[in-house]
Image (cartoon, rainbow, N blue to C red):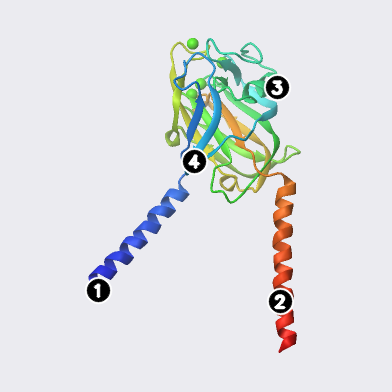
Amino acid sequence: MKTQKLLISASVALGSLLCMTTTAKAANFTTNYTPNNPDPKADIWLQSITQNGQTFGNFSLVESAILRSSQVRLGPASTDRGDNASSPYAPNETPTNQQIAAFLGNRNLNNIIDTEDDDSFNLDIFFDRNIRADNTGLDNLFFWERGKNSDLRIQALDGAGNLIGNALTLFRANQGNGGYSIDTTEIGGSQAVGTWGVTLGQLGVTELKGLKLTSNASFSGPDFKVVARTTPEPGVILGLGTVATLAFFSRRGKKAALNSAN
Ligand SMILES: [Ca+2]
Ligand SMILES: [Ca+2]
Ligand SMILES: [Ca+2]
Ligand SMILES: [Ca+2]
């Protein structure tokens, strides 16, 4: 009996330990796209993401970009697409900020930013709205990287473009599986796409408007796409806050009434 109890508490402890380990590790996610079995050279449309059993399809997309600096061998942070994919502009080795934003700011997973292996860049991107931390347990930022062979460093930006929170390096070894491959204009065959999911907590912030993306020569030229999960509008958060405040005063009122009764 005693042994059985011990075993039960041991397994409960182990269970919560495993639970904690899973939570601490960057969670993987499933990319849902159309068509089902995509041609690596054609359009691949992001429909939704499934994570922790929840599927969501509302995303905030990149709205603007500022290429701060780059060291060029061939083309830094160039715009690229599947060989036969559609894109807002023709791929460009030296893209304008508007072209960078346009390639990142749509749901075509075969419109990406391509970086040569030895190039480095310092690129600010801004989403179409503020991204806020919530208690859904889901990641806030979702990245796809062609080839599963590059790293990328990110840090949050506020609405004025100031750096906030802490930098985070996303390593190729920690990539999940995108579940599809792409063959873009800059490469001769198809490459599997890897993923990173990131919470605002990992960046040390509760809200952001943009991200500074950096790559140096040791990162092996990240080739990426990024979207953010749309979080509730300020009105909704204010609404919840109001409910909590009302509940607080209601409790206080009851307590005060009880005290005066005594
Ligand atoms: Ca290039
Ligand atoms: Ca790559
Ligand atoms: Ca190609
Ligand atoms: Ca590359």
Q: Residue at x 69, y 33 (%)?
A: 126
Q: Which residue is mark 2?
A: 254
Q: Which x, y percent locates residue 49?
A: 52, 35
Helix, strand or loop at disc 3? helix
Q: Mark 4 and mark 3: span between their CA atoms? A: 32 Å
Relative image position of residue 58 (x, y in whole percent) = 62, 35
Rendered location of residue 103, percent (x, y): 63, 21
Do tag 4 and tag 1 residues touch (Cβ < 8 Å)?
no
The mark that comes first in sequence, 1 or 3, is 1
Alpha-carbon distance for marks 2 and 1?
Answer: 46 Å
**Helix, strand or loop under label 4:** strand
Residue 97, which numbered label?
Answer: 3
**Sequence order check, earlier mark of 2 and 1:** 1
- Name the kind of residue labelled 1 in the image: Lys
Amino acid at pointer 3: Asn
The first of marks 4 and 2 along the sequence is 4
Label 4 sits on residue: 51
Q: Which residue is mark 1?
A: 2
Find out whether the residues at labels 4 and 2 contact each other: C-beta distance under 8 Å: no
- Residue 148 visible to the viewer: no
The amino acid pointed to by label 4 is Gln
Camera-side residue: 58 or 12?
58
